[in-house]
Amino acid sequence: MRLIATDLDGTLLRSGGVLSDRTADALRLARRSGSTVVVVTARPPRFTDAYAGLVDLAVCGNGAVVYDPAAGRILTSNCLDVPTARKVADTLRAALPGAGCAVETGHRVFLEPAFTWRCEADTLACCEDELQVEVGSFEEALDRAERITKILVHHPTMRVDAMLATAREVVGRQAEVTHSGGPGLLEVCAAGITKASTVAAVCAERGIPAADVVAFGDAPNDLSMLRWAGTGYAMGNAHPDVLAAAEHRTVTNNEDGVAVVLERLFA
C-alpha cells in the first residue's frame, strides 16, 4: 500500500486520546516501507501537531484543510463562504429547535450563546479553553472568523443520528453534514468537501490510485473515505453504519486495531 489514511479518535488513538507505543511503531514501519501516512480527522489542525514526525500530512476538519504538522502550516483549505454558512445555520436552527451553532476556523471556535457544548481534552473536536471564544451572536462569529472550515451544530437533548437525518434532508446539496460521534454534535463543511474528496486530491497530486490506499475509521464522517479507498477497515468499536458498510474489519482502537493491520501489511 502506498498511502495509509487513518482517522484519529476512536481509530488510531485509544480512549482518552492516547497513541500507544505499538501504534506509533506501526506508523514508523509503514513510512520506512515507503508509504505516505495521512491522519484524516474532524479535529482542527492544531491538534495534529503532536504527531509531527509520525505522519506526513493531516487532513483536518473533515476534509476542509490539508495541514503539514512538521511545518505547522496549512497547505490548502476548502471553506464555507459566509452567505452559505449563514443560510445553513438558519436552516438548521429552524429544523432543530433548541440547537446552537459555532464557527470553527482551524485555529479557534466562535460560539454563539445558544451553543452550550464545550470541548474537553479527550473529545472529538477538541478545542482548548482559551481557543473557545464566546461571542454575542452567530453573526459576530461570522464577522470574526478569518475562515470557516466548518460549522458546529449542537442540540442538548437530541440524538445525533436523528439530527443528522433531519439536517441532511433540509440542507440538501448546500453543504456536507456529518458527525464524528460527539453527543448531539453535527459538523457542516462546504458542499462536496468530505474526508474522501480531500484524500483523493492528496492522492492525485502524488499519482496514487485509490487501489493503493488503505483507510481506517469508526464514525459516519469516515464512511466516504472507507468507501473510496481500495481497502477500507472499520474498527471493532465503530458506529453500526460503518460496520455495515465497510468491506473489512479490524479489532477495536483500544486493542490497537490499526497497528494490527499495518504490522501484517508491512512486516
Image (cartoon, grey):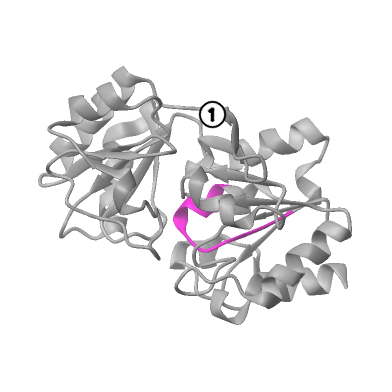
Mark 1 — residue?
A: 77
Residue closest to the eye, 52 or 266: 52
Outermost residue, top side: 83
**Magenta stretch containing residue 215, yes or no?**
yes
Q: Determine whether 5 is above or below 61 in the image.
A: below
Q: Is residue 118 left or right of residue 10?
A: left
**Magenta stretch containing residue 57, yes or no?**
no
Callout 1: SS: strand
Start-end of magenta stretch? 214-224
| Dot 1 amino acid type | Ser
Specify the quadrant of the image occupied by residue 97: top left
Q: Position of residue 72 (x, y in %)?
A: 60, 40
Q: Position of residue 66 (x, y in %)?
A: 60, 37
Q: Determine whether 51 is above or below 106 in the image.
A: below
Q: Determine whether 181 is above or below 82 in the image.
A: below
Q: Is residue 58 left or right of residue 97?
A: right
Residue closest to the eye, 129 or 33: 129
Q: Residue at x 33, y 27 (%)?
A: 145
Q: From this viewpoint, is residue 250 visible?
A: no
Specify the quadrant of the image occupied by residue 249: bottom right
Q: Position of residue 181 (x, y in %)?
A: 38, 60
Q: Which quadrant would the C terminus be assigned to in this image? A: bottom right
Q: Residue at x 39, y 34 (%)?
A: 105
Outermost residue, front side: 130
Specify the quadrant of the image occupied by residue 88: top left
Q: Determine whether 151 is above or below 224 in the image.
A: above
Residue closest to the eye, 214 or 13: 13
Categorize mark 1 by other alpha carbons within 10 Å: few (<14), some (14-19), many (20+): some
Q: Position of residue 5 (x, y in %)?
A: 67, 53
Outermost residue, bottom side: 255
Q: Residue at x 70, y 72 (%)?
A: 259
Q: Which quadrant would the N terminus be assigned to in this image? A: bottom right
